[in-house]
Image: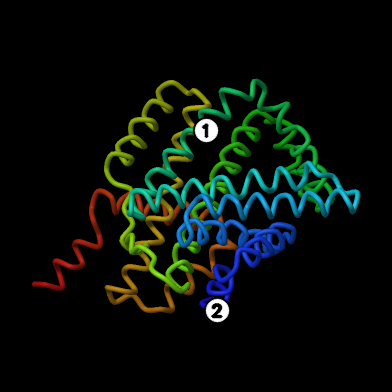
Amino acid sequence: MQPLAAWLVARPQNAVIALAATLLLPVLHIFSGIFMVLLVLKQGVRLAAIQGAAAAALMILVYLVAGAPVLQVVVAILTTWPPAILLAVVLASTRSLTLTMQVSALLAAVAVLGFYAFIADLTAFWQPVMALMVDWATANALLEQAQLIEAEPLLVAHLLTVALIVSSWTMYVLYLLFGYRYANAAPGETGKYGRFCDLNFGRVIAVAVAIVSLLAYATGMPWMQSLAIVLFAVFWFQGLAVVHWMFVDGELPLFVVIMVYVLLPFLHVFMIMALAVVGYTDTWFRYRRRVVAANEE
């Protein structure tokens, strides 16, 4: 990745080409956000924004010439680069990966509140998606799942909202983490803002999760239940950080780390919840600190 990072920052046109090309290709879409984080960290937000604007103009021109829907590329731009720029700016300003991750968790909470504030009818909003889900389930002989979606559309709408916010937040965090990593691989100085394996969301957010969860249980308010789930789910990255720390600074075999990543695509929800439990409890019991103390005895 070092040669690619070096090429990316060598000339402004290289960044424009890379940003545009990766955003247009679905398989490489994630790299567009990663590249934007890298550019902000290496060259500053002003130059990165100019390069992003040039790439956006190039893509819109391509879509106009091809007669393709311009709205599609505009949505892709707005949902990829501004969040990447924001997190990169926070990282460069705070000089702390942990603090930036904490800010990202708060932004996820704001996204939940905003979604419920501005979407008056969640069921109507998600109806086209649920219709596709029913068609797919029926076509694959999953009749019980199809019937559940049709019987509990509001519940499914709340779950889809949570899934959208958690998956989007996860994608933006991946932009940040990989962009930060590859920025350090590019030529020139890049700040050392902390290791991922030392990530800790802190007890303030952990207490907020507990309070919101209790209020959600007591009131039964759907928006509060969704907020509690999202705030808890962000701890899955801290759980993953604990796994990495146990390998880097502890005695966890590499095989275990590999198995975590192998199982993630197949047991997606289960693995994220399991890692979230590890991350959340680590905030209170400080597993990594306990291992260090045990090794010093």
Count of marks overlaid on the render:
2
Looking at the image, residue 196 sits to the left or right of residue 11; the answer is left
Viewer-nearest residue: 172 or 238: 172
Q: Which mark is residue 224?
A: none
Q: Is residue 262 above or below residue 231?
A: below
Seen at 37% across and 78% down, the residue is 253
255 sits to left or right of 112: left
Location of residue 147 by image quarter: top right
Q: Write down the residue under mark 1.
A: 112
Question: Quadrant where the C terminus lies?
Answer: bottom left
Mark 2: amino acid: Pro
Q: Position of residue 116 (x, y in %)?
A: 57, 26
- The way the protein has been coloured in the rendering is rainbow
Residue 48: x and y in percent read 55, 54
Instruction: Categorize mark 2 by other alpha carbons within 10 Å: few (<14), some (14-19), many (20+).
Output: few
Mark closest to the chain's N terminus, 1 or 2: 2
Which residue sits at x=77%, y=45%? 72
Badge 1 density bin: few <14, some 14–19, many ≥20, Cα 10 Å? many
Of residues 51 and 131, which is closer to you in this image?
51
The residue depicted at 48 percent of the width and 31 percent of the height is 225
Taking 79 as reference, is 108 left or right?
left
In the image, 193 versus 291, the foreground residue is 193
Query: What residue does disc 2 label?
Result: 3
Quadrant where the N terminus sits is bottom right
At label 1, which amino acid type do we have? Answer: Val
Instruction: Tell me where residue 82 sits by quadrant.
Output: top right
On screen, residue 258 versus residue 267, left or right, reads: left
Disc 2 is placed on an element classified as: helix
**Label 1–label 2 contact, CB within 8 A:** no
Residue furthest to the left: 297
The percent coordinates of residue 226 (x first, y second) are 51, 33
Say which element carries label 1: helix
